Amino acid sequence: MITIKPGLFLHYGNRIISIFSVLFVLSIIVSAYLILQAPLDYQMLDSVRIMYIHVPSAWLSLNLYFSMGILGFSYIVWRNPLLIHISEAMAQIGCGYALITLITGSIWGRPMWGTYWVWDPRLTSTLILLFFYIGYMLYIYENKPSDKTYFYASVIAIIGSVNVPIVKLSVEMWNTLHQPSSIIRSGGVAIAKSMLIPLISVFFSCISFTIFITFMKVKTRLVQIKAGREKQIKYS
């Protein structure tokens, strides 16, 4: 088994929180400026700016759940509850990203598709992703901290992670209204540099925010355990 002392995590976690809180503030200022300076799309006009929120949120909602699947597998192997604390923090943030993805996608899709929602493979699989996030959090919330609870939460995370490649490949596998990938694709980037730079900047801002909040949430959980306000699962 792997032993990770909470005190060691708290020591380095405080440094990481400080670094990424500063990076987030700086990057969000730069991102806001770049978004305002970015050109309009000839077809979508000003509504194209929704992309700078929609796309990074979609990327992170997928990556966070896939990371939860890895953490879940790691917990089953090593039984370290710190992995679940990290996964739970990621779930809360990832759920927010998934919700933002669906809301901004609906708003963006209205002028393009003439409706806020269609049972499109990409939209449907993203909705399923949101349900997995909610189910994972509800299961942990409704059950007392224990190895059994964490084991089955890990199973939920692993099963849900199977949906991640389905979301990503849905626009390639099925006939869908959703446009194909414009950035991560075999034919290279299909987006103007003037739009790509702000998009990457926002993505970096979201990553900084995610790391900052994740460590803050895990730190809070460990402090609660240390103070005896929450049942402690042995770290071994």
Image: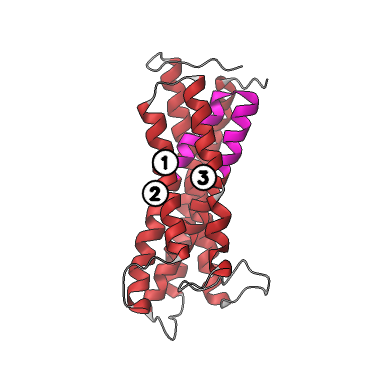
The extreme bottom residue here reads 42
Q: Secondary structure at mark 3?
A: helix
Q: Secondary structure at mark 1?
A: helix
Which residue has dot 2 on it? 96
The residue carrying pointer 3 sits among few (fewer than 14), some (14 to 19) or many (20 or more) residues within 10 Å by Cα, namely: many
Tell me the distance, in whole angstroms, between the alpha carbons under discs 1 and 3. 15 Å
Which residue has dot 3 on it? 160
Q: Is residue 87 magenta?
A: yes
Identify which residue, 182 or 17, lies in the foreground: 182
The quadrant in which residue 141 appears is top left
Q: Is residue 210 left or right of residue 70?
A: left
Identify which residue, 45 or 117, lies in the foreground: 117
On screen, residue 81 above or below 131: above
Q: Are marks 1 and 2 in contact (CB under 8 Å)?
A: yes
The kind of residue on which mark 3 rests is Gly
Q: Which callout, 2 or 3, points at the residue further toward the start of the chain?
A: 2
The quadrant in which residue 169 appears is bottom right
Residue at image position (43%, 28%) is: 220
The kind of residue on which mark 1 rests is Gln
The percent coordinates of residue 124 (x first, y second) are 42, 60
Which residue has dot 1 on it? 92
- Asked if one can make out residue 69 in the rendered structure from this viewpoint, the answer is yes
